[in-house]
Image: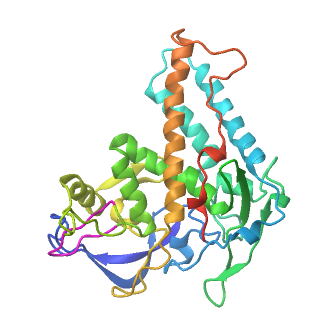
Amino acid sequence: MVALVRHSRRKRGATDRPDLTPPRQSSTLHMREGLPGGSAYAAGEPTGKLDPLGLLECKCSVDACKGLPAVNSRLNAKINSLLISAAMGYMFTKPPRGAADKMKAMHNVYAATAKELGAPPFGLVSKSAIEAWLYGEGAGALPSRFRRFVGWSYHSRLIKVPLAQCLWVKCGHGSYCIGTDKIGHFFQQGFMLWEISRKFDEDYAKAFGEWTEGLYNEPYAGRSWSSMARKPELDKGGRQRKSTKKENDILHWLWNEKFTFHQFGEIKLSAYKDKWGGRRVAPNVPRLAASPEDQAANEAGMKFWTRLWDNWKEIDMVLAGKKKVQKGTSVVNRFDICDYADGKWMEI
């Protein structure tokens, strides 16, 4: 896949110490092979490919969902059928079942939800598997009455891109009009955060999510900083809190290290900076379209994948006779979008 990325020139020694100025970003754009397009559908297309300035957005206001039936039951049934299928495959795996068998089960669910499918022939929109289902593609896909098209965004005079379509999620704790992009973020970027959290911890994972969405606070030469907050944190004396060793380690990791993701292989993490939000028009121009809503969906997705991984361990206990299952219940954790979606997902 070809992705549009921003060229950067690295200042010698700049990333060895977190309190120094990070690499300066050049305003030169060029085409680069090998980077994943992702499925951060701010406008129905990976923003790194069609929107280098990060200006395209989802426009799913509450009014956009008026008259739509709630998507909950259809989406929950779709995901639960995938989870049951993966669990059955895992349970019929010849014991002893190890980490590789659990990961295979995870990847089976990933393939049916988060896998990047690429653009269809003669089309511009590249989708994850779950987004293709939401858009009515394939057998048993979501009917059109559950989503609403809200318009186009123009990348140039020659290319117009559809905005993410809107879905109505109705829960006991609230009702939410969200874009199809949020479901894509939940499964795909959520899985990426889960992969990082599994190797490191949630602090590393959340920092990476903020790094991709334009929400990560960068350090500045001669100043203390906070990598975990959008605004500087103050100590008891009213001074800006100094960064911790762990925050410094995370920053160094983001600028200098690589990480191997399941679908996309080994990628230099610096290539993901502001990839799905918060890009700059020029070095001195404020950030644009940073998306805390996307990050909320990313982190909720990490929670889902963490629960799913833990579920295989519970299945092992049941199969080994160490845990009993009550009559009428299932050993498979049931999926309910209302366990994860909330008002933080809405682009208001």
Q: Horizontal and vertical percent for residue 270?
A: 33, 65
Give the extent of the magenta segment.
217-228
Residue 224 percent location from the top left of the image:
19, 68
212 or 336, which lies in front?
A: 336
Q: In this view, which residue lies farthest toward the top?
A: 321
Residue 303, x across and y down, in percent: 50, 44
> Image point 54% across, 80% down: which residue?
55
- From the viewer's perspective, is residue 255 above or below residue 326? below
Identify which residue, 237 or 27, lies in the foreground.
237
Q: In this view, does 216 lie to the left or right of 293?
A: left
Which residue is at 57% across, 68% downward? Answer: 46
Our reading of the magenta stretch's main secondary structure is loop
Q: How is the image coloured?
A: rainbow
Judge left or right: residue 158 versus residue 31: right
Q: Is residue 75 visible?
A: yes
Residue 99, quarter of picture: top left
- Residue 263: x, y in percent? 50, 50
Residue at the image position 62 percent from the left and 15 percent from the top: 325
